[in-house]
Amino acid sequence: MNFLDAIVLGVVEGLTEFLPVSSTGHLILVSTLLGLKQTEFQKTFEVVIQLGSILAVVFLFYRRLFTDIELWKRIIVAFIPTGVLGFLLYKVIKGYLFNPFVVATMLILGGIVFILVEWWLKRYPPKYSDEDQIPYWKAFAIGLFQSLAMIPGTSRSGATIIGGLLLGLNRKTAAEFSFLLAVPTMFVATGYDIFKHHSEFTFGNWELLAVGFISAFISAYVVVKWFLDFIKRHTFIPFGIYRIAVGLLFFLLAGLGFIRFPQ
């Protein structure tokens, strides 16, 4: 990996972290196209630069994050399932699931689910328009949905948004709660990954992480503001279609021999 690769991956991370299209999935797919192998550092890089995107959310929602106790109670409850399952399944996820085949499959399945959920919402209008109204058991359930995103290609934001929609949150509330839930989730995930692998990093590795981190922060800041405005007027169906198209594209590229799925 060089500095240009780090910038490209940082921008991709920032653009996709809060869109329901799987940032980790896109990082794996773009890395494949760039010819970057999924080494331990590469996998850690793809996790750590997500923290740059998360800091963009802290910057945008700092007043609520530092003043709303009721919100934090629900965020903590929602974080518990991912925290526990992520710790227990860490080695399995990084060892076997970080590959283009899993990503492409989950992109397609997630796209289909988004389209079906939008059809379901026409029959069952939302009940909650503010994060502080979410019952604790529903916050926990959203956390269970987030746990599905440990499978690359699922999309952390996509899973939590779908969970929120099915549990009665309107689109804006589901998206904002997803963003805010990302704060403790990604801080813990990033900290744990750095703790596990920091001894393997060279000075050059830290420089690449810094470049990717900054690129992710800038692009995420732009995307979050755009996304919240977009979902006030549109459904999530375009993202479902996009996911299916990207997943099929990579199956096509694999069939043509441009990328290689694991045997």
Image (cartoon, rainbow, N blue to C red):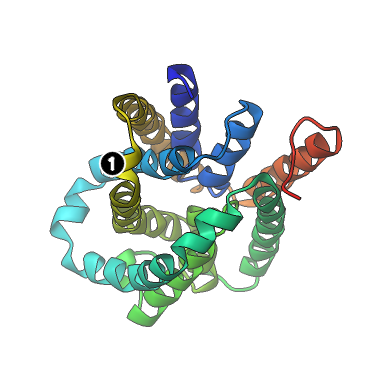
Percent across and percent down for residue 246 are 71, 40
Relative vertical location of residue 177 with respect to residue 197 in this rendering, above or below? below
Q: Is residue 128 visible?
A: no
Mark 1 packing: few (<14 Cα in 10 Å), some, or many (20+)? Answer: many
Q: Is residue 75 visible?
A: yes
Horizontally, residue 166 falls left or right of residue 204, namely: right
Q: Residue furthest right?
A: 256
Q: Residue furthest left?
A: 67
Percent across and percent down for residue 48 are 36, 42
Q: Mark 1: which amino acid?
A: Leu
Front-lying residue, 142 or 230: 142
Which residue: 51% across, 43% down? 23
Which residue: 61% across, 67% down? 121
**Element at label 1:** helix
Horizontally, residue 132 falls left or right of residue 10, namely: left
Front-lying residue, 125 or 9: 9
Percent across and percent down for residue 173 are 40, 59
- Image quarter of residue 222: top left
- Image quarter of residue 205: top left
Which residue: 37% across, 26% down? 208
Front-lying residue, 87 or 176: 87
Q: Residue furthest front?
A: 200
Relative vertical location of residue 235 with respect to residue 91 in this rendering, above or below? above
Horizontally, residue 225 falls left or right of residue 166, namely: left
Relative vertical location of residue 198 with respect to residue 206 in this rendering, above or below? below
Which residue: 42% across, 65% down? 86
Q: Residue furthest bottom?
A: 137
Horizontally, residue 96 falls left or right of residue 67, namely: right
Relative vertical location of residue 30 with respect to residue 237 in this rendering, above or below? above
Q: Which residue corresponds to mark 1?
A: 55
Percent across and percent down for residue 132 are 28, 69
